[in-house]
Image (spheres, rainbow, N blue to C red):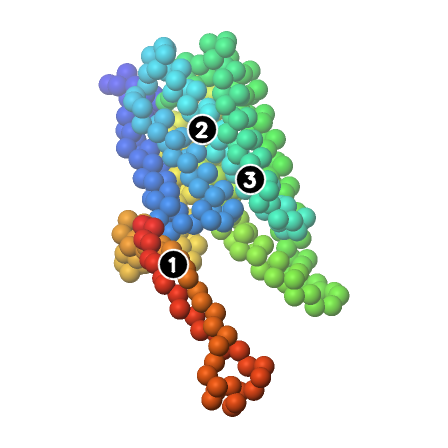
Protein backbone atom coordinates (compact mmCIF):
# COMPACT_ATOMS: atom_id res chain seq x y z
CA UNK A 1 0.00 0.00 0.00
CA UNK A 2 2.80 2.41 0.87
CA UNK A 3 4.53 1.64 -2.41
CA UNK A 4 1.30 2.29 -4.30
CA UNK A 5 0.88 5.65 -2.56
CA UNK A 6 4.46 6.62 -3.35
CA UNK A 7 3.94 5.57 -6.96
CA UNK A 8 0.78 7.68 -7.11
CA UNK A 9 2.79 10.68 -5.91
CA UNK A 10 5.29 10.22 -8.74
CA UNK A 11 5.27 12.48 -11.79
CA UNK A 12 4.24 9.51 -13.96
CA UNK A 13 1.03 9.03 -12.00
CA UNK A 14 0.35 12.75 -11.95
CA UNK A 15 0.74 12.86 -15.70
CA UNK A 16 -1.80 10.07 -16.19
CA UNK A 17 -4.29 11.78 -13.85
CA UNK A 18 -4.24 15.14 -15.65
CA UNK A 19 -3.60 13.87 -19.17
CA UNK A 20 -6.75 15.53 -20.52
CA UNK A 21 -5.74 19.00 -19.37
CA UNK A 22 -3.42 19.84 -22.30
CA UNK A 23 -6.49 19.89 -24.52
CA UNK A 24 -7.53 22.97 -22.56
CA UNK A 25 -4.58 24.70 -24.19
CA UNK A 26 -5.07 23.30 -27.70
CA UNK A 27 -8.79 23.99 -28.13
CA UNK A 28 -8.70 27.65 -26.97
CA UNK A 29 -5.72 28.31 -29.22
CA UNK A 30 -7.65 26.85 -32.16
CA UNK A 31 -10.62 29.08 -31.32
CA UNK A 32 -8.37 32.16 -31.21
CA UNK A 33 -6.79 31.31 -34.55
CA UNK A 34 -10.22 30.68 -36.09
CA UNK A 35 -11.64 34.00 -34.88
CA UNK A 36 -8.61 35.96 -36.04
CA UNK A 37 -8.86 34.33 -39.47
CA UNK A 38 -12.65 34.51 -39.74
CA UNK A 39 -12.94 38.21 -38.89
CA UNK A 40 -9.69 39.15 -40.69
CA UNK A 41 -8.18 40.60 -37.52
CA UNK A 42 -4.70 39.97 -38.88
CA UNK A 43 -4.85 43.28 -40.77
CA UNK A 44 -3.36 45.11 -37.75
CA UNK A 45 0.11 44.51 -36.30
CA UNK A 46 -1.25 44.00 -32.78
CA UNK A 47 -3.51 41.17 -33.91
CA UNK A 48 -0.73 39.60 -35.97
CA UNK A 49 1.45 39.51 -32.85
CA UNK A 50 -1.40 37.82 -30.98
CA UNK A 51 -1.78 35.41 -33.89
CA UNK A 52 1.89 34.44 -33.70
CA UNK A 53 1.69 33.99 -29.92
CA UNK A 54 -1.39 31.79 -30.38
CA UNK A 55 0.45 29.63 -32.91
CA UNK A 56 3.36 29.17 -30.51
CA UNK A 57 0.99 28.27 -27.65
CA UNK A 58 -0.92 25.85 -29.89
CA UNK A 59 2.17 23.90 -30.93
CA UNK A 60 3.53 24.05 -27.39
CA UNK A 61 0.36 22.37 -26.10
CA UNK A 62 0.70 19.56 -28.64
CA UNK A 63 3.85 18.31 -26.91
CA UNK A 64 1.91 17.70 -23.71
CA UNK A 65 -0.45 15.21 -25.41
CA UNK A 66 2.22 13.15 -27.16
CA UNK A 67 1.83 10.39 -24.59
CA UNK A 68 2.85 9.34 -21.11
CA UNK A 69 6.42 9.42 -19.86
CA UNK A 70 8.55 8.23 -22.77
CA UNK A 71 11.69 6.08 -22.51
CA UNK A 72 14.97 7.61 -23.58
CA UNK A 73 15.16 7.53 -27.34
CA UNK A 74 14.33 9.37 -30.55
CA UNK A 75 10.71 10.10 -29.63
CA UNK A 76 11.70 11.36 -26.18
CA UNK A 77 14.36 13.61 -27.71
CA UNK A 78 11.81 14.93 -30.19
CA UNK A 79 9.33 15.73 -27.42
CA UNK A 80 12.06 17.48 -25.42
CA UNK A 81 13.16 19.51 -28.45
CA UNK A 82 9.56 20.37 -29.30
CA UNK A 83 8.86 21.57 -25.76
CA UNK A 84 12.05 23.61 -25.60
CA UNK A 85 11.51 25.20 -28.99
CA UNK A 86 7.88 26.24 -28.58
CA UNK A 87 8.30 27.23 -24.93
CA UNK A 88 11.00 29.56 -26.18
CA UNK A 89 8.80 30.74 -29.06
CA UNK A 90 5.99 31.63 -26.67
CA UNK A 91 8.42 33.49 -24.42
CA UNK A 92 9.97 35.26 -27.42
CA UNK A 93 6.60 36.46 -28.68
CA UNK A 94 5.69 37.74 -25.23
CA UNK A 95 8.98 39.67 -25.25
CA UNK A 96 8.17 41.04 -28.72
CA UNK A 97 4.75 42.18 -27.51
CA UNK A 98 6.35 43.89 -24.50
CA UNK A 99 8.95 45.57 -26.70
CA UNK A 100 6.24 46.66 -29.11
CA UNK A 101 4.27 48.25 -26.27
CA UNK A 102 7.41 49.98 -24.99
CA UNK A 103 8.21 51.48 -28.39
CA UNK A 104 4.63 52.65 -28.91
CA UNK A 105 4.07 54.17 -25.46
CA UNK A 106 7.50 55.40 -24.40
CA UNK A 107 9.17 56.17 -27.73
CA UNK A 108 5.95 57.06 -29.59
CA UNK A 109 6.99 55.40 -32.83
CA UNK A 110 5.16 53.17 -35.27
CA UNK A 111 6.44 49.60 -35.21
CA UNK A 112 5.02 48.12 -38.41
CA UNK A 113 8.45 48.12 -40.04
CA UNK A 114 9.78 45.90 -37.22
CA UNK A 115 7.43 42.99 -37.92
CA UNK A 116 9.96 41.03 -39.97
CA UNK A 117 12.58 41.48 -37.24
CA UNK A 118 10.07 40.19 -34.68
CA UNK A 119 9.52 37.02 -36.70
CA UNK A 120 13.23 36.41 -37.25
CA UNK A 121 13.94 36.79 -33.54
CA UNK A 122 10.90 34.90 -32.22
CA UNK A 123 11.24 31.86 -34.49
CA UNK A 124 14.97 31.81 -35.28
CA UNK A 125 16.62 32.28 -31.86
CA UNK A 126 14.52 29.55 -30.16
CA UNK A 127 15.42 27.11 -32.93
CA UNK A 128 19.14 27.58 -32.32
CA UNK A 129 18.79 27.31 -28.54
CA UNK A 130 16.61 24.19 -28.70
CA UNK A 131 19.09 22.41 -30.98
CA UNK A 132 22.10 22.90 -28.68
CA UNK A 133 21.20 20.06 -26.22
CA UNK A 134 20.75 17.68 -29.16
CA UNK A 135 24.44 17.90 -30.01
CA UNK A 136 25.43 16.68 -26.54
CA UNK A 137 22.55 14.21 -26.13
CA UNK A 138 21.30 16.08 -23.06
CA UNK A 139 17.61 15.42 -23.71
CA UNK A 140 15.87 12.54 -21.94
CA UNK A 141 13.20 11.66 -19.34
CA UNK A 142 12.90 14.53 -16.85
CA UNK A 143 9.80 14.14 -14.72
CA UNK A 144 6.36 14.30 -16.29
CA UNK A 145 7.79 15.04 -19.75
CA UNK A 146 11.06 14.62 -21.57
CA UNK A 147 13.43 17.54 -21.28
CA UNK A 148 17.05 18.14 -20.25
CA UNK A 149 17.90 15.31 -17.84
CA UNK A 150 18.76 15.71 -14.16
CA UNK A 151 22.38 14.80 -14.92
CA UNK A 152 22.81 18.02 -16.91
CA UNK A 153 21.35 20.64 -14.57
CA UNK A 154 23.86 23.25 -15.76
CA UNK A 155 22.37 23.06 -19.24
CA UNK A 156 18.92 23.74 -17.83
CA UNK A 157 20.20 27.03 -16.46
CA UNK A 158 22.10 27.89 -19.65
CA UNK A 159 19.27 27.07 -22.02
CA UNK A 160 16.27 28.17 -19.98
CA UNK A 161 16.53 29.49 -16.42
CA UNK A 162 19.12 32.26 -16.78
CA UNK A 163 17.61 33.67 -20.00
CA UNK A 164 14.10 33.33 -18.53
CA UNK A 165 14.96 35.23 -15.33
CA UNK A 166 16.79 37.89 -17.33
CA UNK A 167 13.92 38.41 -19.76
CA UNK A 168 11.30 38.44 -17.00
CA UNK A 169 13.31 41.08 -15.13
CA UNK A 170 13.66 43.20 -18.28
CA UNK A 171 9.94 42.86 -19.05
CA UNK A 172 9.09 44.00 -15.52
CA UNK A 173 11.29 47.07 -15.97
CA UNK A 174 9.64 47.80 -19.32
CA UNK A 175 6.19 47.51 -17.80
CA UNK A 176 7.06 49.82 -14.92
CA UNK A 177 8.33 52.37 -17.43
CA UNK A 178 5.24 51.95 -19.62
CA UNK A 179 2.88 52.45 -16.66
CA UNK A 180 4.82 55.49 -15.44
CA UNK A 181 4.89 57.19 -18.85
CA UNK A 182 1.22 56.43 -19.50
CA UNK A 183 0.18 57.98 -16.18
CA UNK A 184 2.36 61.03 -16.75
CA UNK A 185 0.72 61.71 -20.10
CA UNK A 186 -2.74 61.41 -18.62
CA UNK A 187 -2.09 63.80 -15.72
CA UNK A 188 0.01 66.42 -17.54
CA UNK A 189 -0.64 68.55 -20.61
CA UNK A 190 1.43 71.22 -22.27
CA UNK A 191 1.69 72.98 -25.60
CA UNK A 192 -0.86 73.73 -28.26
CA UNK A 193 -3.43 71.36 -29.63
CA UNK A 194 -2.08 69.29 -32.52
CA UNK A 195 -4.65 67.20 -34.43
CA UNK A 196 -1.99 64.93 -35.94
CA UNK A 197 -0.54 64.17 -32.51
CA UNK A 198 -3.98 63.42 -31.11
CA UNK A 199 -4.77 61.10 -34.00
CA UNK A 200 -1.47 59.32 -33.41
CA UNK A 201 -2.39 58.86 -29.75
CA UNK A 202 -5.70 57.28 -30.73
CA UNK A 203 -3.97 54.88 -33.13
CA UNK A 204 -1.40 53.94 -30.49
CA UNK A 205 -4.13 53.37 -27.92
CA UNK A 206 -5.81 50.94 -30.32
CA UNK A 207 -2.50 49.08 -30.69
CA UNK A 208 -1.90 48.94 -26.94
CA UNK A 209 -5.35 47.83 -25.80
CA UNK A 210 -5.32 44.22 -27.09
CA UNK A 211 -1.68 43.56 -26.12
CA UNK A 212 -1.17 44.80 -22.59
CA UNK A 213 -2.29 41.70 -20.63
CA UNK A 214 -0.58 38.90 -22.58
CA UNK A 215 2.86 39.22 -20.91
CA UNK A 216 1.26 39.30 -17.45
CA UNK A 217 -0.75 36.16 -18.18
CA UNK A 218 2.35 34.38 -19.47
CA UNK A 219 4.23 35.15 -16.28
CA UNK A 220 1.33 33.92 -14.14
CA UNK A 221 1.00 30.60 -16.00
CA UNK A 222 4.77 30.02 -15.99
CA UNK A 223 5.20 30.56 -12.25
CA UNK A 224 4.62 27.00 -10.97
CA UNK A 225 6.59 25.21 -13.72
CA UNK A 226 9.45 27.60 -13.02
CA UNK A 227 9.38 26.95 -9.26
CA UNK A 228 9.17 23.18 -9.74
CA UNK A 229 12.09 23.06 -12.19
CA UNK A 230 14.23 25.15 -9.86
CA UNK A 231 13.39 22.84 -6.95
CA UNK A 232 14.25 19.82 -9.11
CA UNK A 233 17.57 21.40 -10.02
CA UNK A 234 18.46 22.01 -6.36
CA UNK A 235 16.95 18.78 -4.93
CA UNK A 236 16.83 16.30 -7.84
CA UNK A 237 15.98 13.28 -5.65
CA UNK A 238 13.27 14.99 -3.54
CA UNK A 239 10.26 15.90 -5.74
CA UNK A 240 7.46 17.83 -4.05
CA UNK A 241 3.95 16.57 -4.75
CA UNK A 242 2.22 19.99 -4.74
CA UNK A 243 4.80 21.65 -6.99
CA UNK A 244 4.74 18.75 -9.43
CA UNK A 245 0.95 18.71 -9.50
CA UNK A 246 0.72 22.46 -10.11
CA UNK A 247 3.42 22.16 -12.76
CA UNK A 248 1.53 19.44 -14.62
CA UNK A 249 -1.76 21.36 -14.41
CA UNK A 250 -0.53 24.83 -15.35
CA UNK A 251 2.17 24.09 -17.94
CA UNK A 252 -0.24 23.31 -20.82
CA UNK A 253 -2.54 26.27 -20.06
CA UNK A 254 -0.82 28.98 -22.10
CA UNK A 255 -3.43 28.64 -24.83
CA UNK A 256 -6.32 28.83 -22.36
CA UNK A 257 -4.83 31.88 -20.63
CA UNK A 258 -4.29 33.64 -23.95
CA UNK A 259 -7.87 32.85 -24.99
CA UNK A 260 -9.14 34.33 -21.72
CA UNK A 261 -7.33 37.61 -22.38
CA UNK A 262 -8.44 37.51 -26.01
CA UNK A 263 -12.06 37.24 -24.85
CA UNK A 264 -11.71 40.30 -22.62
CA UNK A 265 -11.53 42.52 -25.70
CA UNK A 266 -14.98 44.14 -25.98
CA UNK A 267 -14.68 44.53 -29.73
CA UNK A 268 -13.95 40.83 -30.19
CA UNK A 269 -16.66 39.80 -27.75
CA UNK A 270 -19.17 42.00 -29.58
CA UNK A 271 -18.42 40.18 -32.82
CA UNK A 272 -19.24 36.77 -31.36
CA UNK A 273 -22.94 36.95 -32.18
CA UNK A 274 -24.89 34.65 -34.46
CA UNK A 275 -25.45 37.42 -37.00
CA UNK A 276 -21.80 38.47 -37.05
CA UNK A 277 -20.61 34.88 -37.34
CA UNK A 278 -23.01 34.19 -40.21
CA UNK A 279 -21.86 37.30 -42.07
CA UNK A 280 -18.20 36.43 -41.49
CA UNK A 281 -18.70 32.87 -42.74
CA UNK A 282 -20.59 34.10 -45.79
CA UNK A 283 -17.84 36.60 -46.47
CA UNK A 284 -15.25 33.83 -46.28
CA UNK A 285 -16.99 31.01 -48.12
CA UNK A 286 -20.05 32.38 -49.92
CA UNK A 287 -18.88 35.72 -51.25
CA UNK A 288 -20.58 36.23 -54.65
CA UNK A 289 -18.94 39.55 -55.44
CA UNK A 290 -17.93 39.70 -59.10
CA UNK A 291 -15.49 42.15 -60.59
CA UNK A 292 -16.59 43.41 -64.00
CA UNK A 293 -14.63 45.47 -66.49
CA UNK A 294 -16.40 48.00 -68.69
CA UNK A 295 -14.70 48.98 -71.93
CA UNK A 296 -15.72 51.94 -74.11
CA UNK A 297 -15.14 52.31 -77.83
CA UNK A 298 -16.05 54.55 -80.78
CA UNK A 299 -16.79 57.78 -78.95
CA UNK A 300 -17.75 60.46 -81.48
CA UNK A 301 -17.49 64.16 -80.77
CA UNK A 302 -19.84 66.19 -83.00
CA UNK A 303 -19.28 69.91 -83.41
CA UNK A 304 -22.06 70.47 -85.97
CA UNK A 305 -25.32 72.04 -84.85
CA UNK A 306 -28.41 73.12 -86.62
CA UNK A 307 -28.71 76.69 -87.84
CA UNK A 308 -31.68 77.39 -85.60
CA UNK A 309 -29.79 76.22 -82.52
CA UNK A 310 -26.69 78.16 -83.56
CA UNK A 311 -28.63 81.41 -83.61
CA UNK A 312 -29.83 80.84 -80.05
CA UNK A 313 -26.55 79.53 -78.65
CA UNK A 314 -24.06 81.91 -80.18
CA UNK A 315 -20.94 81.43 -82.26
CA UNK A 316 -18.76 79.86 -79.57
CA UNK A 317 -21.16 77.10 -78.58
CA UNK A 318 -19.97 73.52 -79.18
CA UNK A 319 -22.25 70.56 -78.72
CA UNK A 320 -20.64 67.22 -77.82
CA UNK A 321 -22.55 64.05 -78.56
CA UNK A 322 -21.24 60.78 -77.18
CA UNK A 323 -22.23 57.50 -78.79
CA UNK A 324 -20.30 54.78 -76.94
CA UNK A 325 -20.58 51.13 -77.76
CA UNK A 326 -20.08 49.40 -74.42
CA UNK A 327 -18.89 45.83 -74.05
CA UNK A 328 -19.16 43.94 -70.78
CA UNK A 329 -16.50 41.48 -69.74
CA UNK A 330 -17.00 39.29 -66.71
CA UNK A 331 -13.73 38.91 -64.78
CA UNK A 332 -15.09 36.34 -62.34
CA UNK A 333 -14.87 36.46 -58.57
For image coordinates 49% across by 49% down, the residue present is: 44
Residue 195 at x, y percent in the picture: 65, 66
Q: Looking at the image, is mark 2 or mark 3 earlier in the sequence?
A: 2
The answer to the question of whether label 3 and label 1 lie on touching residues, with beta carbons closer than 8 A, is: no
Q: Are marks 1 and 2 in contact (CB under 8 Å)?
A: no
Q: Residue at x 39, y 31 (%)?
A: 59
Q: In front: 308, or 231?
A: 308
On the image, the x and y values in percent for residue 156 come to: 52, 19
Q: Position of residue 190 (x, y in %)?
A: 74, 65
Local crowd at mark 1 within 10 Å, few (<14), some, or many (≥20)? few
Alpha carbons under labels 2 and 3: distance apart: 19 Å
Which numbered disc flags the more N-terminal residue, 3 or 1?
A: 3
Picture quarter with the N terminus? top left
Q: Is residue 287 visible?
A: yes
> Is 322 placed above or below 249 here?
below
Indicate left or right for 236 with 178 as reference. Answer: left
Quadrant position of residue 269: bottom left
Q: Secondary structure at mark 3?
A: helix
- The spot of residue 87 in percent (x, y) is 46, 29
Q: Answer left or right for 64 relative to 189.
A: left
The secondary structure type at the circle numbered 1 is strand
Q: Which residue is mark 3?
A: 115
Question: Where is mark 2, residue-wise?
Answer: 86
Comparing marks 3 and 1, which lies closer to the viewer? 1
Q: CA distance from mark 1 to mark 2?
A: 52 Å
Q: Choose between 136 and 176: the one closer to the eye.
A: 136
Q: Earlier in the sequence, mark 1 or mark 2?
A: 2
The residue pinned by badge 1 equals: 294
What residue is at 55 percent from the left and 40 percent from the top? 115
Amino acid sequence: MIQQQQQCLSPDCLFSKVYYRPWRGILPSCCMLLIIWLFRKYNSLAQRLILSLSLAAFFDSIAYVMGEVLPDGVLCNFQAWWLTYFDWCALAWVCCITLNLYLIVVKEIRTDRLELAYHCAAWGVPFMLSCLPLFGDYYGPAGAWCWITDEHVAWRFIIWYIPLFTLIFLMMLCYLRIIYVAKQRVTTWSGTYEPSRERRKVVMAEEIKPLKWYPCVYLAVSLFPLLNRIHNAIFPSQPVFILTLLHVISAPLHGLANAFVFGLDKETWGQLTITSLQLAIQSRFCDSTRIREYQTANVHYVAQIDEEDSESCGDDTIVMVSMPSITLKDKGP
